[in-house]
Amino acid sequence: MSKAKVAIFWAGSCGGCDIATIDIHETLIPLIDKIEFVFWPCAMDFKYDDVKKMKDKEIDVCFFNGAIRNSENEEVAKLLRAKSKIMVAFGSCSAFGGIPSLINFYPKKELFDWVYKNCPSVEKSGVEPQTEVKIGEYHLELPEIYEVVLKLSDVVEVDYIMPGCPPVPEQIIKVVTAILEGKLPPKGATIGASEKNVCDECKRTKKEKKVKRFYRIIEKDYIDLNECLLDQGLICLGPATRAGCGAQCPNANFGCRGCYGPAEGVKDQGLKMVSALASIVDAKDEKEINAILDTIVDPAGTFYRYTMSDSLVKKKAY
Protein backbone atom coordinates (compact mmCIF):
# COMPACT_ATOMS: atom_id res chain seq x y z
CA MET A 1 0.00 0.00 0.00
CA SER A 2 1.45 3.40 -0.96
CA LYS A 3 2.21 5.93 1.74
CA ALA A 4 0.13 9.07 2.21
CA LYS A 5 2.04 12.10 1.00
CA VAL A 6 1.98 14.82 3.67
CA ALA A 7 3.10 18.47 3.55
CA ILE A 8 3.52 20.78 6.54
CA PHE A 9 4.19 24.48 6.09
CA TRP A 10 4.85 27.34 8.52
CA ALA A 11 3.67 30.78 7.35
CA GLY A 12 3.03 33.82 9.60
CA SER A 13 3.31 32.21 13.02
CA CYS A 14 5.67 31.43 15.88
CA GLY A 15 6.49 27.84 14.90
CA GLY A 16 4.62 26.35 17.85
CA CYS A 17 2.46 24.17 15.59
CA ASP A 18 5.59 22.49 14.21
CA ILE A 19 6.86 21.98 17.76
CA ALA A 20 3.52 20.41 18.73
CA THR A 21 3.82 18.03 15.79
CA ILE A 22 7.29 17.00 16.91
CA ASP A 23 5.94 16.62 20.46
CA ILE A 24 3.99 13.59 19.29
CA HIS A 25 7.26 11.75 20.03
CA GLU A 26 7.11 7.96 19.85
CA THR A 27 3.35 8.03 19.16
CA LEU A 28 4.30 8.90 15.59
CA ILE A 29 6.29 5.68 15.13
CA PRO A 30 3.32 3.45 14.16
CA LEU A 31 2.38 6.01 11.50
CA ILE A 32 5.82 6.32 9.91
CA ASP A 33 5.24 3.37 7.60
CA LYS A 34 2.04 5.00 6.38
CA ILE A 35 3.28 8.58 5.84
CA GLU A 36 5.81 10.21 3.55
CA PHE A 37 6.69 13.83 4.28
CA VAL A 38 7.13 15.42 0.87
CA PHE A 39 7.43 19.00 2.14
CA TRP A 40 8.27 20.13 5.69
CA PRO A 41 10.85 22.96 5.53
CA CYS A 42 10.96 23.40 9.32
CA ALA A 43 12.21 19.85 9.84
CA MET A 44 13.84 18.80 6.56
CA ASP A 45 15.68 20.33 3.62
CA PHE A 46 12.90 21.06 1.16
CA LYS A 47 12.68 23.91 -1.35
CA TYR A 48 9.73 25.60 -3.05
CA ASP A 49 10.95 24.19 -6.35
CA ASP A 50 10.38 20.68 -4.96
CA VAL A 51 6.68 21.49 -4.68
CA LYS A 52 6.47 23.28 -8.03
CA LYS A 53 7.74 20.12 -9.77
CA MET A 54 4.91 18.03 -8.29
CA LYS A 55 1.74 17.21 -10.18
CA ASP A 56 -1.49 18.90 -9.13
CA LYS A 57 -3.14 17.05 -6.22
CA GLU A 58 -0.06 14.87 -5.75
CA ILE A 59 0.05 15.73 -2.02
CA ASP A 60 -2.63 13.85 -0.08
CA VAL A 61 -2.91 16.34 2.78
CA CYS A 62 -1.29 19.65 3.63
CA PHE A 63 -1.22 20.95 7.19
CA PHE A 64 -0.79 24.71 6.73
CA ASN A 65 -0.02 26.62 9.92
CA GLY A 66 0.39 30.36 10.26
CA ALA A 67 -1.52 33.41 9.08
CA ILE A 68 -1.15 35.13 5.71
CA ARG A 69 1.01 38.12 6.61
CA ASN A 70 2.80 38.78 3.35
CA SER A 71 2.89 38.00 -0.36
CA GLU A 72 5.19 34.98 0.11
CA ASN A 73 2.72 33.40 2.55
CA GLU A 74 -0.07 33.80 -0.01
CA GLU A 75 2.04 32.53 -2.90
CA VAL A 76 3.00 29.35 -1.03
CA ALA A 77 -0.58 28.84 0.19
CA LYS A 78 -1.85 28.92 -3.41
CA LEU A 79 0.95 26.62 -4.56
CA LEU A 80 0.24 24.04 -1.85
CA ARG A 81 -3.51 24.31 -2.46
CA ALA A 82 -2.97 23.41 -6.11
CA LYS A 83 -0.77 20.45 -5.22
CA SER A 84 -2.89 19.10 -2.32
CA LYS A 85 -6.05 17.01 -2.24
CA ILE A 86 -6.85 18.15 1.31
CA MET A 87 -5.90 21.51 2.81
CA VAL A 88 -6.09 21.80 6.60
CA ALA A 89 -5.91 25.16 8.39
CA PHE A 90 -3.66 23.89 11.15
CA GLY A 91 -3.69 25.95 14.34
CA SER A 92 -5.29 29.24 15.32
CA CYS A 93 -3.15 31.54 13.17
CA SER A 94 -4.12 29.71 9.99
CA ALA A 95 -7.74 29.21 11.04
CA PHE A 96 -8.52 32.64 12.55
CA GLY A 97 -5.50 34.94 12.10
CA GLY A 98 -4.17 34.17 15.58
CA ILE A 99 -2.05 36.51 17.66
CA PRO A 100 -0.38 37.99 14.52
CA SER A 101 -3.78 39.40 13.49
CA LEU A 102 -3.82 41.71 16.52
CA ILE A 103 -1.74 44.04 14.35
CA ASN A 104 -4.97 44.67 12.43
CA PHE A 105 -5.74 47.23 15.14
CA TYR A 106 -2.98 49.41 13.64
CA PRO A 107 -2.19 50.61 10.10
CA LYS A 108 0.94 49.21 8.45
CA LYS A 109 2.52 52.66 8.30
CA GLU A 110 2.27 53.04 12.07
CA LEU A 111 3.87 49.62 12.49
CA PHE A 112 6.74 50.48 10.13
CA ASP A 113 7.28 53.87 11.74
CA TRP A 114 7.67 52.24 15.14
CA VAL A 115 9.84 49.30 14.09
CA TYR A 116 12.18 51.14 11.72
CA LYS A 117 12.15 54.72 13.02
CA ASN A 118 10.85 55.26 16.55
CA CYS A 119 11.68 52.09 18.49
CA PRO A 120 14.46 52.98 21.03
CA SER A 121 16.41 49.82 20.20
CA VAL A 122 16.94 50.47 16.50
CA GLU A 123 19.41 52.61 14.59
CA LYS A 124 17.77 55.88 13.53
CA SER A 125 18.47 55.46 9.83
CA GLY A 126 14.79 55.45 8.94
CA VAL A 127 15.39 52.81 6.27
CA GLU A 128 12.36 50.60 5.64
CA PRO A 129 12.32 47.23 3.82
CA GLN A 130 11.62 47.46 0.11
CA THR A 131 10.08 44.75 -2.04
CA GLU A 132 12.78 45.22 -4.70
CA VAL A 133 16.34 46.50 -4.43
CA LYS A 134 19.07 46.59 -7.09
CA ILE A 135 22.66 46.52 -5.89
CA GLY A 136 25.04 46.54 -8.82
CA GLU A 137 24.31 43.47 -10.89
CA TYR A 138 22.18 41.90 -8.15
CA HIS A 139 18.40 42.13 -7.97
CA LEU A 140 17.05 41.38 -4.49
CA GLU A 141 13.40 40.80 -3.60
CA LEU A 142 11.51 40.69 -0.31
CA PRO A 143 7.88 39.70 0.29
CA GLU A 144 5.38 42.53 0.53
CA ILE A 145 3.92 42.92 4.01
CA TYR A 146 0.16 43.26 3.75
CA GLU A 147 -1.91 46.02 5.32
CA VAL A 148 -3.75 43.42 7.40
CA VAL A 149 -3.16 39.84 8.51
CA LEU A 150 -5.46 37.33 6.78
CA LYS A 151 -6.56 33.83 7.70
CA LEU A 152 -5.80 30.99 5.27
CA SER A 153 -9.37 30.75 3.94
CA ASP A 154 -9.15 34.38 2.81
CA VAL A 155 -6.74 33.37 0.04
CA VAL A 156 -7.43 29.69 -0.73
CA GLU A 157 -10.19 27.13 -0.24
CA VAL A 158 -9.76 25.31 3.09
CA ASP A 159 -11.18 21.81 3.54
CA TYR A 160 -10.86 21.51 7.32
CA ILE A 161 -10.07 23.70 10.33
CA MET A 162 -7.94 22.26 13.12
CA PRO A 163 -7.82 24.88 15.91
CA GLY A 164 -5.44 25.37 18.82
CA CYS A 165 -2.39 27.39 19.79
CA PRO A 166 -1.04 24.92 19.17
CA PRO A 167 -3.28 21.88 18.62
CA VAL A 168 -2.49 19.38 21.37
CA PRO A 169 -0.48 16.29 20.28
CA GLU A 170 -3.38 13.93 21.05
CA GLN A 171 -5.52 15.98 18.69
CA ILE A 172 -2.91 15.79 15.92
CA ILE A 173 -2.64 12.00 16.19
CA LYS A 174 -6.42 11.68 16.17
CA VAL A 175 -6.73 13.73 12.98
CA VAL A 176 -3.82 12.05 11.17
CA THR A 177 -5.27 8.64 12.01
CA ALA A 178 -8.71 9.69 10.72
CA ILE A 179 -7.13 10.87 7.47
CA LEU A 180 -5.23 7.61 6.98
CA GLU A 181 -8.36 5.58 7.70
CA GLY A 182 -10.55 7.71 5.45
CA LYS A 183 -12.82 8.68 8.33
CA LEU A 184 -12.86 12.46 7.97
CA PRO A 185 -16.19 14.31 8.25
CA PRO A 186 -17.64 16.27 5.31
CA LYS A 187 -15.46 19.12 4.08
CA GLY A 188 -15.84 22.39 5.90
CA ALA A 189 -15.86 20.78 9.34
CA THR A 190 -13.72 21.61 12.35
CA ILE A 191 -11.66 18.52 13.16
CA GLY A 192 -9.81 17.33 16.23
CA ALA A 193 -11.94 19.47 18.53
CA SER A 194 -15.34 19.38 20.22
CA GLU A 195 -18.72 20.91 19.43
CA LYS A 196 -18.98 21.96 23.09
CA ASN A 197 -17.33 24.97 24.72
CA VAL A 198 -14.48 25.03 27.23
CA CYS A 199 -16.89 25.53 30.15
CA ASP A 200 -18.36 22.11 29.33
CA GLU A 201 -14.92 20.53 29.75
CA CYS A 202 -13.96 22.56 32.81
CA LYS A 203 -14.44 20.81 36.18
CA ARG A 204 -14.64 24.00 38.22
CA THR A 205 -17.83 24.71 40.14
CA LYS A 206 -20.04 27.33 38.52
CA LYS A 207 -22.47 29.51 40.46
CA GLU A 208 -24.94 32.21 39.54
CA LYS A 209 -22.58 34.78 40.95
CA LYS A 210 -22.32 38.47 40.10
CA VAL A 211 -19.03 40.36 40.05
CA LYS A 212 -18.24 43.92 41.10
CA ARG A 213 -14.95 44.13 39.23
CA PHE A 214 -12.61 42.12 37.03
CA TYR A 215 -9.03 41.27 37.94
CA ARG A 216 -5.81 40.44 36.22
CA ILE A 217 -4.42 37.27 37.70
CA ILE A 218 -1.52 39.19 39.29
CA GLU A 219 -4.01 41.34 41.19
CA LYS A 220 -5.57 38.44 43.09
CA ASP A 221 -4.19 37.48 46.48
CA TYR A 222 -6.07 34.19 46.41
CA ILE A 223 -7.66 32.08 43.69
CA ASP A 224 -9.99 29.25 44.62
CA LEU A 225 -8.83 26.10 42.81
CA ASN A 226 -12.34 24.71 42.49
CA GLU A 227 -14.52 27.74 41.79
CA CYS A 228 -15.24 29.09 38.30
CA LEU A 229 -12.64 31.71 37.43
CA LEU A 230 -15.24 34.07 35.97
CA ASP A 231 -17.17 33.89 39.23
CA GLN A 232 -13.98 35.10 40.90
CA GLY A 233 -13.73 38.07 38.56
CA LEU A 234 -10.96 36.62 36.41
CA ILE A 235 -11.34 36.87 32.65
CA CYS A 236 -11.86 33.42 31.15
CA LEU A 237 -13.01 33.00 27.55
CA GLY A 238 -14.44 29.54 28.22
CA PRO A 239 -18.07 30.48 27.44
CA ALA A 240 -17.15 31.67 23.93
CA THR A 241 -14.41 29.16 23.05
CA ARG A 242 -14.60 25.75 21.38
CA ALA A 243 -13.55 22.83 23.55
CA GLY A 244 -10.99 20.20 22.63
CA CYS A 245 -7.89 21.04 24.64
CA GLY A 246 -9.17 19.51 27.88
CA ALA A 247 -9.56 22.94 29.52
CA GLN A 248 -5.80 23.07 30.04
CA CYS A 249 -5.60 26.72 31.07
CA PRO A 250 -8.42 26.63 33.68
CA ASN A 251 -6.91 23.40 35.02
CA ALA A 252 -3.65 25.33 35.50
CA ASN A 253 -5.54 28.06 37.42
CA PHE A 254 -5.46 30.44 34.49
CA GLY A 255 -8.38 31.74 32.44
CA CYS A 256 -9.02 30.30 28.98
CA ARG A 257 -7.36 32.56 26.42
CA GLY A 258 -9.61 31.52 23.54
CA CYS A 259 -7.11 29.81 21.25
CA TYR A 260 -9.54 27.16 19.94
CA GLY A 261 -11.63 29.91 18.41
CA PRO A 262 -15.39 30.46 18.47
CA ALA A 263 -17.56 27.77 20.01
CA GLU A 264 -19.97 25.91 17.74
CA GLY A 265 -22.61 28.28 16.40
CA VAL A 266 -20.74 31.44 17.48
CA LYS A 267 -20.02 33.87 14.64
CA ASP A 268 -17.90 36.34 16.60
CA GLN A 269 -15.95 35.15 19.63
CA GLY A 270 -15.36 38.64 21.02
CA LEU A 271 -19.02 39.65 20.89
CA LYS A 272 -20.05 36.37 22.49
CA MET A 273 -17.62 37.02 25.33
CA VAL A 274 -18.92 40.55 25.84
CA SER A 275 -22.42 39.10 26.12
CA ALA A 276 -21.24 36.52 28.66
CA LEU A 277 -19.55 39.16 30.82
CA ALA A 278 -22.60 41.43 30.67
CA SER A 279 -24.66 38.67 32.27
CA ILE A 280 -22.49 38.54 35.41
CA VAL A 281 -21.86 42.26 36.02
CA ASP A 282 -23.45 43.15 39.36
CA ALA A 283 -24.77 46.62 38.57
CA LYS A 284 -27.80 48.31 37.04
CA ASP A 285 -26.63 51.92 36.93
CA GLU A 286 -24.87 52.78 33.64
CA LYS A 287 -22.07 54.64 35.38
CA GLU A 288 -21.37 51.71 37.70
CA ILE A 289 -21.53 49.22 34.83
CA ASN A 290 -18.97 51.24 32.88
CA ALA A 291 -16.72 51.45 35.94
CA ILE A 292 -16.77 47.65 36.28
CA LEU A 293 -16.07 47.15 32.57
CA ASP A 294 -13.18 49.61 32.81
CA THR A 295 -11.40 47.10 35.06
CA ILE A 296 -10.94 44.84 32.01
CA VAL A 297 -7.46 45.57 30.67
CA ASP A 298 -7.24 45.66 26.84
CA PRO A 299 -10.69 44.19 26.09
CA ALA A 300 -10.23 44.15 22.31
CA GLY A 301 -6.86 42.43 22.55
CA THR A 302 -8.26 40.00 25.11
CA PHE A 303 -11.50 39.03 23.38
CA TYR A 304 -9.95 38.85 19.90
CA ARG A 305 -6.53 37.55 20.87
CA TYR A 306 -6.74 34.71 18.36
CA THR A 307 -9.64 35.58 16.07
CA MET A 308 -9.30 39.15 14.78
CA SER A 309 -9.04 38.01 11.14
CA ASP A 310 -12.13 35.84 11.63
CA SER A 311 -14.21 38.48 13.42
CA LEU A 312 -17.04 40.57 12.02
CA VAL A 313 -14.74 43.60 12.31
CA LYS A 314 -11.56 42.00 10.85
CA LYS A 315 -9.64 45.22 11.28
CA LYS A 316 -9.92 48.57 13.01
CA ALA A 317 -11.30 51.41 10.91
CA TYR A 318 -8.47 53.92 10.67
Image (cartoon, helix red, strand yellow):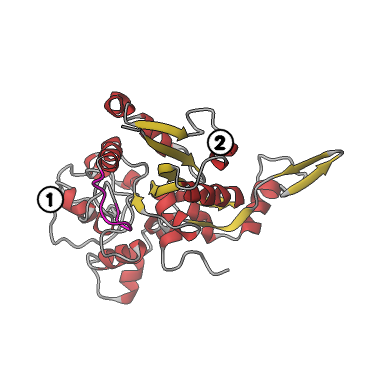
Pick whichever, 112 or 117, lies toward us: 112
Instruction: Confirm whether the magenta stretch covers residue 8.
Output: no
Residue 156 is situated, as x and y percent measured from the top left of the image, at 48, 57
Q: Check disc 1 and report its element: helix, strand or loop.
A: loop
Horizontal side, residue 150 vs residue 261: left or right: right
Q: Residue at x 32, y 52 (%)?
A: 215
Magenta part of the chain: 182-190
Whichever of labels 1 and 2 marks the residue nearer the N terminus, that label is 2
Badge 1, how many Cα within 10 Å: few under 14, some, many 20+?
few
Can residue 126 be seen in this snapshot? no
Q: Are marks 1 and 2 in contact (CB under 8 Å)?
A: no
Q: Amino acid at mark 1?
A: Thr
Q: Residue at x 37, y 34 (%)?
A: 21
Residue, far bottom: 285
Q: Mark 2 = which residue?
A: 50
Q: Mark 1 = which residue?
A: 205
Instruction: Confirm whether the magenta stretch covers residue 183.
Output: yes
Q: Check disc 2 and report its element: helix, strand or loop.
A: helix
Residue 182 is situated, as x and y percent measured from the top left of the image, at 26, 45
Badge 2, how many Cα within 10 Å: few under 14, some, many 20+?
few
Tell me which secondary structure the magenta stretch mostly adopts: loop
Q: Residue at x 47, y 34 (%)?
A: 40
Q: Quadrant of the C terminus?
A: bottom right
Pick whichever, 98 or 103, lies toward us: 98
Residue 235 is situated, as x and y percent measured from the top left of the image, at 30, 54
Q: Amino acid at mark 2?
A: Asp
